């Protein structure tokens, strides 16, 4: 089994959840800054024509497959990925890791109040977990400087960033060294789910990889993203044909 799978020129780490958690624990212990990307098919599609985002992928310490679309792409290319490492499930595992090891976290993102609500839910489910701080994601340039100064001062071991995709990945990459956080990871709209503002998909839909459909039902504006999935798969098939010719 390959350690990395090439999908549309992007190297996806072929790891299971347990290995992902172990690697992230190692990153924290190293103390140097690391970016982790939970990649999905729409993110890869957006990165094809975005040179900055391509560079972010290339520099990241770990890129895990967050979507059923990437698993399907791996199968099409004859490079199967071991399993999905979904962002929100990874978060819960990392909360448990931080609770056990005494690591601290900072939650940054979502609309005002949601990160704080998510933090309260996390405190209830993971007693004793050190939450260094929270801040919403609707900050201007002046507030951004204040948020960054706070994060540097509080020195969390892990920074969860819930901005839109791919803004969160590029924001992390731009500020990672300045923040000095051992691990920073973009988690999209997970704060909305953790806070209880949005209900997570039923277990059956989660297991079938249909959480994207559930979120689209709850938030119909997402349909404009979903229609890009056939385009992504067409590009994957084109890669397969090109690989055969070469």
Image (cartoon, rainbow, N blue to C red):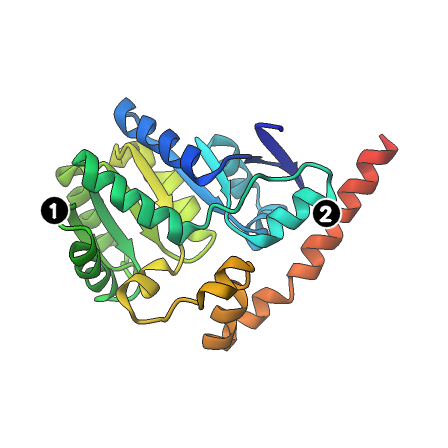
Outermost residue, right side: 245
Q: Nearer the viewer, residue 31 or 214?
A: 214
Image quadrant occupied by the N terminus: top right
Res. 116 image quadrant: bottom left
Give the foreground label among 1 and 2.
1
> Please, is residue 161 above or below residue 174 in the view?
below
Res. 143 image quadrant: bottom left
Res. 162 image quadrant: bottom left
Image quadrant occupied by the C terminus: top right
Residue position marked by numbered label 2 in the rendering:
236
Identified at 57% across, 72% down, the residue is 223
Q: Could you say where residue 3 lies in the image, as x and y percent from the top left?
A: 57, 28
Identified at 46% across, 55% down, the residue is 165
Q: Which mark is residue 207?
A: none
> Please, is residue 166 above or below residue 151 in the view?
below
Q: Nearer the viewer, residue 202 or 226?
A: 202
Judge left or right: residue 152 versus residue 81: left
Judge left or right: residue 86 versus residue 181: right
Mark nearer the N terminus (1 vs 2): 1
Residue position marked by numbered label 1 in the rendering:
128
């Amino acid at each position: 089994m390959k350690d990395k799978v090439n999908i549309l020129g992007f190297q996806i780490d072929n790891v299971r959840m347990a290995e992902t958690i172990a690697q992230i624990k190692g990153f924290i212990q190293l103390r140097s800054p690391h970016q982790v990307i939970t990649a999905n098919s729409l993110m890869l599609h957006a990165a094809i024509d975005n040179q900055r985002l391509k560079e972010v992928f290339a520099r990241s310490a770990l890129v895990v497959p967050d979507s059923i679309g990437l698993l399907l792409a791996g199968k099409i290319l004859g490079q199967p990925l071991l399993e999905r490492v979904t962002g929100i499930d990874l978060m819960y595992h990392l909360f448990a890791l931080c609770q056990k090891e005494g690591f601290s976290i900072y939650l940054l993102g979502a609309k005002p109040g949601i990160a704080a609500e998510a933090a309260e839910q996390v405190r209830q489910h993971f007693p004793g977990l050190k939450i260094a701080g929270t801040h919403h994601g609707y900050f201007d340039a002046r507030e951004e400087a204040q948020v960054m100064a706070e994060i540097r001062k509080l020195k969390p071991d892990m920074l969860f960033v819930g901005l839109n995709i791919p803004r969160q990945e590029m924001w992390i990459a731009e500020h990672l060294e300045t923040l000095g956080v051992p691990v920073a990871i973009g988690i999209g709209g997970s704060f909305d789910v953790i806070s209880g503002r949005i209900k997570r998909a039923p277990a059956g839909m989660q297991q079938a990889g249909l959480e994207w459909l559930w979120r689209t039902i709850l938030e119909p504006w997402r349909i404009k993203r979903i229609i890009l999935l056939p385009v992504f798969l067409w590009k994957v098939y084109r890669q397969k044909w090109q690989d055969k010719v070469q």
